[in-house]
Image (cartoon, grey):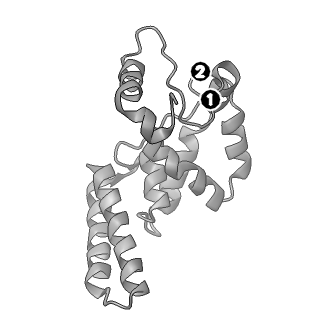
Amino acid sequence: DFIASAFAFMAINIGIKIAKVINRDSKALEQRSIDLKKAINSIYCSENGFGCGSQGENAIALNFNLTTKENHSVVLNNLLQSLGDDLPLLCGALGLYSIFPVLENEGFNQLILKILRQNVWGSFYYWITKYGATTPIESLYYQKGDKMSLLMLDYLKNTGKDVIGVGK
């Protein structure tokens, strides 16, 4: 899928940087990166952006430099449209990792501020004001019938609390 391919692309590019730091030949990795970028674009990029055109997929594509000169503005515009009309962030943790750096790099600092100040269910500010959240993805408060919240709460209770510092 797109996310796995994007992270493989990122890992290859980290390998290129490491090879250069330790004075190793990176030509094979550089070619692999070029080939993978072409393949990802041909398989996953459409008029909706990358993958299914979600906020997270488009943000990851932009942040990982998967876009080309030809599709960069289309992907960026699709991301910006998905953030309009006072909608909260609809991406998960992986997309969130990319969305703010992309908006900052593209000069949309006011949009970042607008997103962070939204006070609708699911937005960052909602969770801060209502439940004291400390990060944009700390929206794990259980809503009746929300099975994902139950799964996440179970995960935190059993395994995640040591990893992310919750519950200590």
**Which quadrant of the figure has residue 125?**
top right
Q: Furthest-top residue in view?
A: 144
The answer to whether 105 is drawn above or below residue 53 in the figure is: below
Residue appearing at x 43%, y 68% in the figure: 68
Q: Is residue 110 left or right of residue 152?
A: right
- Residue 153: x and y in percent read 42, 22
Residue at 71% across / 38% down in the picture?
Answer: 114
Image coordinates for residue 111, horizontal then vertical, percent: 69, 45
Callout 1 secondary element: loop
Q: Alpha-carbon distance for marks 1 and 2?
A: 13 Å
Mark 1 vs mark 2: in front: 1
Circles 1 and 2, Cβ within 8 Å, touching? The answer is no
Secondary structure under badge 2?
Answer: loop
Residue that carries the numbered disc 1 in the rendered image: 133
Residue 39, label in figure? none
Q: Considering only vertical position in the picture, is 35 above or below 71?
A: below
168 relative to 82, above or below: above
Q: Around disc 1, counting alpha carbons within 10 Å, would you say few (fewer than 14), some (14 to 19), or many (20 or more)?
A: some
Image location of residue 38, percent across then percent down: 30, 68
Q: In the rendered view, would you say 117 is above or below 17? A: above
Q: Is residue 96 at least partly visible in the picture?
A: yes
Give the residue type at disc 2.
Trp
Identify the residue under disc 2.
Answer: 121
Which three-letter amino acid code belongs to the residue tagged 1? Ala
Q: Residue at x 36, y 22 (%)?
A: 154
Q: Nearer the viewer, residue 132 or 40?
A: 132
